[in-house]
Structure formats: structure tokens, C-alpha cells
Amino acid sequence: MVILLREVSDRRTWRRWAYLVMGAALLMPYWFLLMVLVGLSPLKGMWGGVAVLLLPIPAAVVTGLVAGVRQMEGTAVKELLGGPLAGMNVPVARSLRARVSTGLWFSLHLHVGVVVGAASLAVPPFAAVLMLFPFLGWSMLEDERGVLHAWKGSPYQWLAPPAGLACLVALLGLIVIAGRVLAAFAPLFLGPTSEERVVELEEKAAKLAERNRLARELHDSVGHALSVVTLQAAAASRVLDRDPAFAREALTAIEESARAALTDLDHVLGLLREDKARTTPQPTLADLGRLVEQTKLAGVELDHSVDDAVGGVPAAVSREAYRIVQEGLTNALRHAGKVPVTLRITVAEQRLHVVLANPLGGTPSRTRDGGGRGLGGIRERVTVLRGDMAAGPDGGEWRMEVSLPLMSGA
């Protein structure tokens, strides 16, 4: 009894009841149409009744084959029935398997709803008659052929109220059991198929890859600019009194670096907003001169050489190579400080080679806390282009070598 009272007070029970009764309402047009058709057909008597009762089953299945029925039923199940399907995605049925499953579910929903709906209409009045029977002498009960007439005035008449209460309890049990069973089986009929799960996983993987790409863009572009700006500001503050010309030059470089960072940030935000007007072109190796000058102004002695053939590198490879060089220089600034850095960019045997080295044992720059994602971001870029990468101590210096196939950007 406590369990039943708990079910009565649970909103989900009555939401499920509403879902079941909705199925009964949806089945009524089928019955009305078949009653008219059977009346016009040769089927009479018992066979006509059987046709009216059974033909709605395949009719509901056929209706469920419509693509949008699955999404409609899925939405109703999520909102009213609940259960495991509440957390699943229910797309429009496109495959034959999904449509057949939806048709079977639609027919099941409608016919179980008819049973529950009919019981909901018939049982409460009958239970009320039973519970009030010993106290009221209604003329409608004075039927010599009825059981209630035989009970009237006998000790058995007091069995009627408990029987009425039992009918209400049985009705509630029917509603609870039918709702729970349908909620448990809904994912089997309306849940995503194996093909839809694969598509969903591919979409999630694509979104994750895009998020990681945007994170790399922010880390490499804005992170580099902030590192350079911090070093330039520190250098300018130290020599502001004794070397105003250098301080002015450093402040100018800070302004240029900040503007470049804002441009890169605007580009990434444009990608996030899908705003084509604000997705400016990304820098390539052709823009390496500005990056080199910013690094030198930060106090780094940079020895660099770039092959003339770099101008013919495919755009995709050139963009990624620029970001790789940018992150490599940022790592040198952040972890080694103002040490001499060697940068070599060459093209040979249909591959772009980037070599960046700096002495070990420098003084790390305290530009910011955290970090640790620089080499990981470079490795991700190299992997996407099917290239090779090696980074680590080599003798007395830290050395990073990257080799990218030119055809990966074709």
C-alpha cells in the first residue's frame, strides 16, 4: 500500500498515464474509419467485429513507417514516459530498420493505450458503485438477475467496498506496470540504430577535433603574442630611464604584437561564430618576417635562414608550419629565456624541414603559470599533416626537428 501511495504521488506515473491515454485517442480515427468500411463491406456480425478490432494493428504499423513519426514519438516519450530514452537522441527515421521499429512501437503504444484508457473510463465508476453499494438503495441495482441484487441485505454486501477499492488498486497497478514496461522498451524501438550511433560518434569526433584546432590556434597565436609582450614590457621598464629610444621601440613592438594578437583572436572568434566576414586569412611562412622581428625585439638573439623554395609550399602546410615555428619560439622564450635561438627552414625531397634549437641551461621566463601544451599542440599539427617530429635534449642544446610532406597540403 505504501508503494502504491508513493506511485500515486509521483508525477511520472501520471505523465505516463497521459502518454498511454494519448495512444488511445490516436487510435480512435482508425476505429471510426474501419467501422464505416466494414459497414459497407460484406463482413457482418462476428467477423465484422473481429475486423474492426484487428485491422487497426497493421494500420498503425503502416502509419509508423512515416519518417517523422519516430521523432514525434521520441519527443513524447522523453517528455511524458521518461526512462532510458530520455537521455538519447531520437532523429528522424531514415533507414528501413528504423521505420519498421517505429511502426511496431507506434502500434504497441496505441493498443496498450486503448486498454489503459478503456480501463480508466470504466473502472472508477464501477468501483464507486461497489464502495457505496451497502449505503445506497439505488433502483438501478434492483436487478433480480444481478449479483448485487443477491448481495443486497446480506452480510456479503460489505464485501463490495473492499472489492471497489481493489478495482482502483488494480487500475493503478495497470497504469504503473504499463508505463514502466513501455519506458523500459522504448530504447529498443526508438533508440538509435548501430548506423546512427556511428554517425553520431563521427559528428562528436569532428566537433572535438574542431575544438582542439581552435584551442591550438588560440594557444599558438595569442599565447605567443602575450609571451612576447610580457618580455618586451619587462625590458622596456628596465631601460626606460637610461635608454628611452630602446624603450620606445619596445613599446612600439608591444603595440604591434597586441594588434596581431587581436587579429588572430578575431579570426578564431569568427570561426566560433561561423561569421565568414570575420574569418581573416591565417598567417603563413610568408609572414615569418614579422614573427622574427617580434622575437628579436623581445631580446632573443635569433639566427634564422629560410629557403627561397618555401614560397612554393602549399598553403595548408605553410599555415601549419608558421604555427609550429611560432610555438617553438614561444617555448624557447618561456622555458629558456633570452638565449640564442637557431631556426632553419628548408625544402628538400618534397618535404618541408623545420629545425629549431637553443642552448640548455637558460633562465626560464616567468610569463605565466601553467603551460605544458606547446609540444602537444605541435605534435597534433604534425600528425594531421602526416609528418614526423622529434624534440628533446641533444648534447648541450634543446632541439626540435619537424618534417612535413608537401603533398599533405595538396
Image (tube, rainbow, N blue to C red):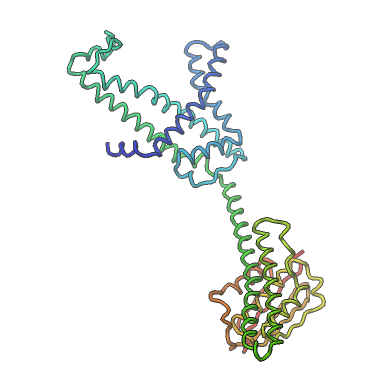
Q: Residue 291, relative to residue 66: is it above or below?
A: below
Q: Measuring from the top left, give residue 33's x and y in whole percent.
A: 56, 19
Residue at 45% from the left image edge and 41% from the top image edge: 82
Does 159 sit left or right of 23 as displayed?
left
Going by the picture, which residue comes out furthest to the left?
Answer: 155
Q: Measuring from the top left, give residue 201's x and y in whole percent.
A: 58, 53
Going by the picture, which residue comes out furthest to the bottom?
Answer: 242
Residue at 76% from the left image edge and 69% from the top image edge: 406
Q: Residue 321, relative to residue 195: is it above or below?
A: below
Q: Measuring from the top left, give residue 361's x and y in whole percent.
A: 58, 89
Between 294 and 128, which is closer to the camera in this rendering? 294
Residue 342 in view in this figure: yes
In the rendered image, which quarter contains the C terminus? bottom right
Q: Residue 197, relative to residue 33: is it above or below?
A: below
Residue at 70% from the left image edge and 67% from the top image edge: 263
Does 140 sit left or right of 86 as displayed?
left
Between 183 and 17, which is closer to the camera in this rendering? 17
Residue at 45% from the left image edge and 38% from the top image edge: 81
Does 368 sit left or right of 83 as displayed?
right
Does 226 sit left or right of 75 as displayed?
right
